[in-house]
């Protein structure tokens, strides 16, 4: 190998090692989370959850009730002044979630990872009812794994995490190729990682 070729190989090895460790550092915690929750999701039926339900109630003041009832759109967001009052009285943030408006009530679904919640406002009496159901930390982490009701920021995190995992795997694959001649079991081991899941899918998973 010429001196120029050795220098080029050394340069790319350094680059690949740098990208490999940087990508592994970025996705390390995420990979641990997704690996652990992969196990808990796979055994979800054996892991019991005891839902905890909490309720809160209040009555909307007449001026705010009038503001609420002035809304005619069946999928409108609760007016800001009403949202602010609910946040102060019940410590519930409705955000910009649209409500389901009927003649009798306004219903706002507030699904979240690891549980569920809803808030309703009686358009006649102004009675506000809020219910929160929590299924525990395992359910919370499982829902993060699935991206269920986790919001836009978590969606972006999963995309960035997936790109980091791709960089980690691809740079690892190239590094394997560069070192394979000195490690005879490299490609048989890689092949095993492909063949085993394919065989399980073909032999044991029925369409």
Image (cartoon, helix red, strand yellow):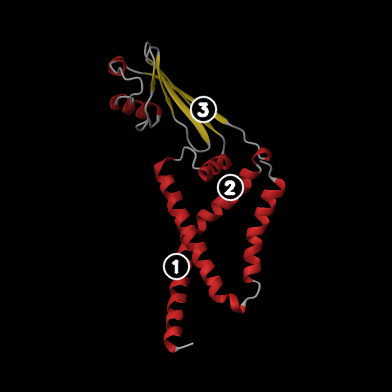
Q: Could you say where residue 140 lies in the image, as x and y percent from the top left?
A: 53, 41
From this view, report whether residue 140 is shown above or below residue 86.
Answer: below
**Which residue is located at x 62 percent, y 69 percent?**
187
Q: Hey, which quadrant is residue 134 in on the image?
A: top right
Image quadrant holding the C terminus, namely top right
Upstream in the sequence, badge 3 or badge 1? 1
Q: Is residue 77 left or right of residue 11?
A: left
**Which residue is located at x 69 percent, y 42 percent?**
206
Q: Secondary structure at mark 1?
A: helix
Q: Is residue 167 left or right of residue 185?
A: left
Q: Could you say where residue 145 lies in the image, as x and y percent from the top left?
A: 53, 45
Crowd around label 2: few <14 · some 14–19 · many ≥20 (10 Å) = many
From this view, report whether residue 201 is shown above or below residue 170.
Answer: above
Q: Which residue is mark 1?
A: 19
From this view, report whether residue 81 is shown above or below residue 39.
Answer: above
Q: Is residue 34 left or right of residue 108?
A: right
**Which residue is located at x 54 percent, y 28 percent?**
53
Q: Could you say where residue 96 lies in the image, as x and y percent from the top left?
A: 34, 32
Q: Could you say where residue 69 lies in the image, as x and y percent from the top left?
A: 31, 15
Q: Secondary structure at mark 3?
A: strand
Upstream in the sequence, badge 2 or badge 3? 2
Q: Which residue is mark 3?
A: 54
Q: Which mark is residue 37?
A: 2
Q: Spatial distance from mark 3 to mark 1, Cα to Cα?
A: 47 Å
Q: Hey, which quadrant is residue 102 in on the image?
A: top left
């Amino acid at each position: 190998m010429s001196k120029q070729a050795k220098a080029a190989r050394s340069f790319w090895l350094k680059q690949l090692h740098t990208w490999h460790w940087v990508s592994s550092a970025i996705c390390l915690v995420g990979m641990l989370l997704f690996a652990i929750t992969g196990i808990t999701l796979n055994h979800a039926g054996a892991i019991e959850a005891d839902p905890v339900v909490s309720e809160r109630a209040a009555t909307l003041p007449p001026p705010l009730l009038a503001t609420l009832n002035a809304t005619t759109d069946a999928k409108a967001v609760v007016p800001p002044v009403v949202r602010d009052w609910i946040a102060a009285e019940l410590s519930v943030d409705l955000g910009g979630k649209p409500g389901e408006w009927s003649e009798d009530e306004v219903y706002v679904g507030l699904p979240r990872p690891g549980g569920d919640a809803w808030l309703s406002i009686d358009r006649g009496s102004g009675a506000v009812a809020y219910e929160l159901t929590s299924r525990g930390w395992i359910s919370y982490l499982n829902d993060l794994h699935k991206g269920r009701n986790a919001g836009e920021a978590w969606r972006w995190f999963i995309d960035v995490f997936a790109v980091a995992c791709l960089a980690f795997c691809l740079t690892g694959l190239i590094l394997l190729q560069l070192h394979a001649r000195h490690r005879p079991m490299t490609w048989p081991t890689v092949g095993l990682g492909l063949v085993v899941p394919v065989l399980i899918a073909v032999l044991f998973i029925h369409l």
